């Protein structure tokens, strides 16, 4: 299974991990419907632990900007 790390382009404050093969998802923070084909994929991996690590690093970068 492949995992991708995305940042919500609407609220720009939520990073989430999505599984490969989906066409859309919902931002868990702002509730926006996000079409996968329009999203920037920050990282893709088959290792869930790697995806979690990248997500955590992106969240820390976003927190530094605030």
Image (tube, grey):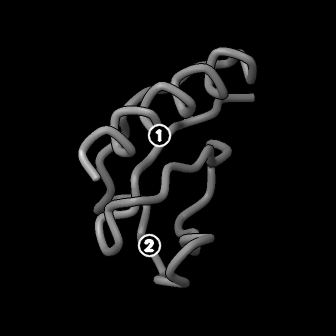
Question: In the rendered view, does 62 fall on the left or right side of 52?
Answer: left
Give the number of callouts. 2
Looking at the figure, which quarter contains the N terminus?
top right
Q: Are marks 2 and 1 in contact (CB under 8 Å)?
A: no
Disc 2/disc 1 C-alpha distance (Å) = 19 Å
Mark 1: which secondary structure?
helix
Mark 2: which secondary structure?
strand
- Decide: is 7 above or below 10: above
| Residue at left offset 74%, top offset 18% | 49
Residue 41 % position (x, y): 37, 40
Question: Mark 2 or mark 1, which is nearer to you?
Answer: 1
- Decide: is 66 above or below 20: below
Question: In the rendered view, does 11 fall on the left or right side of 17?
Answer: left
Question: In the rendered view, does 35 fall on the left or right side of 52?
Answer: left
User: As rendered, which of 46 and 26 lies closer to the eye?
Assistant: 26
Residue 38 % position (x, y): 28, 62
For marks 2 and 1 on the same chain, the one whose residue lies earlier in the sequence: 2
Residue count near mark 2 (Cα–Cα under 10 Å), binned few <14, some 14–19, many ≥20: some
Image-quadrant location for residue 47: top right
User: As rendered, which of 65 and 25 lies closer to the eye?
Assistant: 65
| Residue at left offset 41%, top offset 70% | 35
Residue 63 % position (x, y): 39, 44
| Residue at left offset 56%, top offset 73% | 29
Image-quadrant location for residue 37: bottom left
Residue 49 is tagged as none
- Decide: is 32 above or below 6: below
Seen as rendered, the residue at the extreme left is 65
Give the residue at mark 2. 34
Residue 58 % position (x, y): 42, 33
Give the residue at mark 1. 59
Residue count near mark 1 (Cα–Cα under 10 Å), binned few <14, some 14–19, many ≥20: some
Image-quadrant location for residue 51: top right
């Amino acid at each position: 299974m492949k995992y991708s790390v995305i940042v919500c382009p609407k609220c720009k404050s939520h990073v989430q991990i999505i599984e490969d093969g989906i066409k859309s998802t919902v931002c868990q923070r702002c509730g926006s419907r996000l079409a996968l084909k329009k999203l920037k994929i920050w990282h893709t991996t088959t290792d869930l632990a790697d995806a979690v690590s990248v997500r955590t690093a992106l969240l820390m970068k976003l927190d530094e900007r605030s």
